Structure formats: C-alpha cells, structure tokens
Amino acid sequence: MKQFPIQQARNLVNEFFDFVAKAVSPFHVTSLCKERLAKSGFRELNETENWKLEKGGKYFFTRNLTTIVAFTVGQQFDPNNTGFKIIGAHTDSPCLRLAPVSKLDSNGFLQTCVSTYGGGLWHTWFDRELTLGGRIVFKKDNVYQSQLFHHQKPLLKIPNLAIHLTTDRNSFAPNNESNLRPVFAQEAYQTLTGIEKPSSEGQTSFENKHYKYLLNLITEQTGIPTADILDIDLYFSDCQPPSYFGLNQEFISAARIDNLFSSFFSLLAITNPESFAEDQTFINMICLYDHEEVGSQSAQGADSSLLSNNMKRIYDILSNSNQTSTDSFYKAIQRSFLISSDMAHSIHPNYSDKHQQNHRVKMNEGIVIKVNHNQRYATDGVSSAILRVIAQQADVPIQDFIVRNDSPCGSTIGPLQASNTGIKTIDIGAAQWGMHSIRETAGVVDGYYLEKLFVQFFKQYEKIDHKLLGI
C-alpha cells in the first residue's frame, strides 16, 4: 500500500492555521488572498476601470473588499475553443457583529449591542474570550478610505449563567437578544484604579453611538483619529488559535472552517504552478463570495450578476478578433464546469441516527459529493461523473452524501451559480463536525485531498470529452 504523505498534509494544515487565525472577517480573508495572489504574479484589476488582458495572464479583482475573483488565461486561449473552469467558495462565516449603535450597560458593566449574522450555534459563543476585527471607514484629507482593524488580545466575553441560578438545568436555550451581550469593562474597576472616563464633549454623531473606550482602542492601533471615522464594520471572533487534537493529532480545531477551508485550498490550487499548463485553452477561476451564510443576495454575493457579467467581460476582451464566431461565448459557457466547494457533515459518533444510513461520510476519508434531488445542491449524474474522473486521476477518494428524508437540507452557492450562469455545477466539500459552531472540527488529510483535486481539475478538465455535458 502506498504510504500517505502525512507530513505534506500537515504542512498544508499549518499554512491553513496561519491563514484562518488572521482571517477574522471577510475583509481580512480578501486581504490575505490578495497578498498571496500578488506574490504569485497575479495582477490586480479594478471593476471601475477598463481592463487589458492577454493570453497567459494572471489576474484578480475584488468587490466590496469581501469578495475576490482570481483567474488565469490559458496560454493557448482560443475564443472558438474555450471555457471556464471555476471553483466557488465563500469568505463569510456565522458570527456576532457589532451593532450600528453598540453602547450598552447593565448594573455597572459596559457591554456591546450585537447583531447575529447567519445561523450560528450561538450557545457555543458563551465563555469564550472574544475580540473584534473588520473594516474602519474614514475620511482623511478629503479622501474617503478604509483600513483593516484586528485587536489581537482578548477583549470581551459572554459569561454563562451559573447552574445554581437556572430554572431548567437540562437545557440551554439563550435568548439571542437579551443573553448575547458581551461584557468588556466594569465601571467599579475603572473608578477603583483611577481610569479616567473619556469626555463626550465635542463628539461627532458617530462617536456618540459607541463607547469612547472602543474608539480610542481603534485609534491607538490604526492611527485614525476618532473624529475622522465615518463608520465601522466589526466582527466578533474567538481569540483561541487553531490547533490539532486526537491521539494521533488527526483532527484540526479552528474557527471559520466553514468555509475558509475551501477558500484557502482553492487559493492554493490556482496559485500552484501545476494548475497553469502551457497547452491550456480554458480559463481557470476561483470565486470567493461574501454573504453565503445569509442567502447570497447582495452585489458581492453568489446570487448576483458578478460571475456572469465578468465572464462575458473577460471573454469579450480576449476575443477581440474578426475570427471569433458570434455565438462562441455561449458555446464556451456550455463547455464550462463549476465546482461549488463548501463543507459537509461528517458522521457524528454521538448522534449517528441523524445521518442517512447509506451515506455516512467521515473526516480523513475523502472529499464528499453532496446530492439533493430537490436542488438544494446542484449535483447531478453528469457533474458527479466528471468529478469522479478527475478525482480518480488525482488519486483522491470520494464519498457520497445525502440528508435523511425526515431532515432539512442546507444549501450553498452551487444552485445559485448554476441557475445564474447556465454552467454545469457540482456541490462538494470536506467533511467536518460542528458546522456553525464558534469552533469547528475537520480532518488533517482532507486539505491535502482538496488541493490535489482542485489542481487536477484545473489541469485536466478541458481534456475530458465535452460531449458528456450534453447527456
């Protein structure tokens, strides 16, 4: 039996750990992706400017600084014989967000008003050391700008209620409005230690919405005067760093595995030189969207015209030739393929009855093809067959997942992208535990499998007989 390259898999996980620890908001995800793409020779484009593209070129652009699209043009690009090889994932995760007016206090404790984002397992946010990160919007020298912010020390906590004070000790169902209120300071301690209360004199209307302590903290780290701040987009996150666990260290524990796991390994794949063969005529692309966790209906979400408009834009620029057939773009769309990569539910040993008995997928045992005949996933027999061919070429094991008939099924960007573009699509993912918990679990080897599959897809898809797409 061929020995599995476990050290290579761990090296990839270590890279993921570094990424996810810094990626505390979609703004940070996009910034980290931009940094890696630029180091790999990709050139940044701006949607508000005219583009110049060429064969063999590598490019990326962002929207709202929370969605990022990167693509490479085949060196043998032929407008009459091309298509798009696309991997889609998302940059957002369920979390708590700082409310527009965040000042809140109770019985001498300073707290923050929050909004829930997405369908989080909110009980997992209790008794965790939390911090804040995101984007600061400000005006300097009459120029509107934004800057990232991430306070890297524990700042807040949502404390649990002692068991002695609960009426029902066998259940925990916090009220999302009244119980999800992080504490970040105590007035009595400030008085005792002589900490001066910031003056509210001369504050702007924005400054009156948030505690001066918080705004001063932002100013100390960013250098932006509080009077220049116009607004803030801040996300709460767990301070605990990602880690391995298990007797053989076979599991990984981290925040935001759903879906930064897919985002990171698609980024690795498109920047991997093996994905960029000299004989390619197709366009490789990754689309990492914001707002998947809340329905994707935004200008930067997967249920927008972002992908379809920019595919046409890219094709038209590259096909500026009298030799291009008038309907070649539409032929290219039908020759294209989209992998929607989100996470999947591994069998849970304590709740095995929640899983369909013939489709109990597991971490560390291969990538999961997700099927739902009610179109909650976009997979069908043809897209599944194509992926299995690619996986076999890459020596990546595949598992099959459906939900029980008496269980609701989540969805993701696959059906939205398929319906908006007309591209054959499949939904896949790596298996995990605790989806939407503040701290999720995945398998050590699945990142290795995911990158191998993505690289093989970029290398080999266009060589598959495209008549299969018409079946």
Image (tube, rainbow, N blue to C red):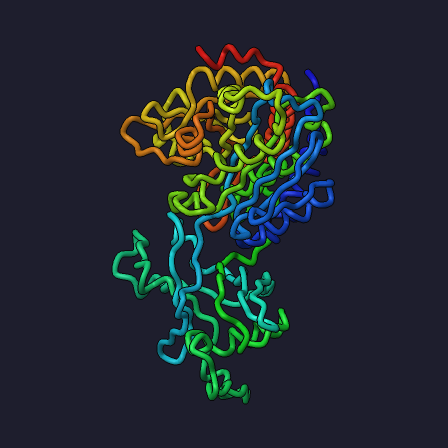
Vertical placement of residue 358 versus 218, above or below: above
Q: Residue at x 48, y 18 (%)?
A: 384
| Front in this rendered view, residue 228 or 455 | 228
| Front in this rendered view, residue 43 or 165 | 43
Please indicate, yes or no, whether residue 360 appears anywhere in the rendered image. Answer: no
Vertical placement of residue 284 versus 193, above or below: above
Picture coordinates of residue 80 (x, y %)? 59, 19
Please indicate, yes or no, whether residue 39 appears anywhere in the rendered image. Answer: yes
Outermost residue, left side? 167
User: Total label count?
Assistant: 0
Q: Residue at x 60, y 25 (%)?
A: 453
| Front in this rendered view, residue 84 or 207 | 84
What is the quadrant of residue 73 in the picture?
A: top right
Picture coordinates of residue 303 (x, y %)? 41, 39
What is the quadrant of residue 147 in the picture?
A: bottom right
Picture coordinates of residue 269 (x, y %)? 65, 33
Picture coordinates of residue 297 (x, y %)? 39, 44
Q: Residue at x 52, y 22 (%)?
A: 326
Vertical placement of residue 274 versus 143, above or below: above
Q: Residue at x 42, y 74 (%)?
A: 209
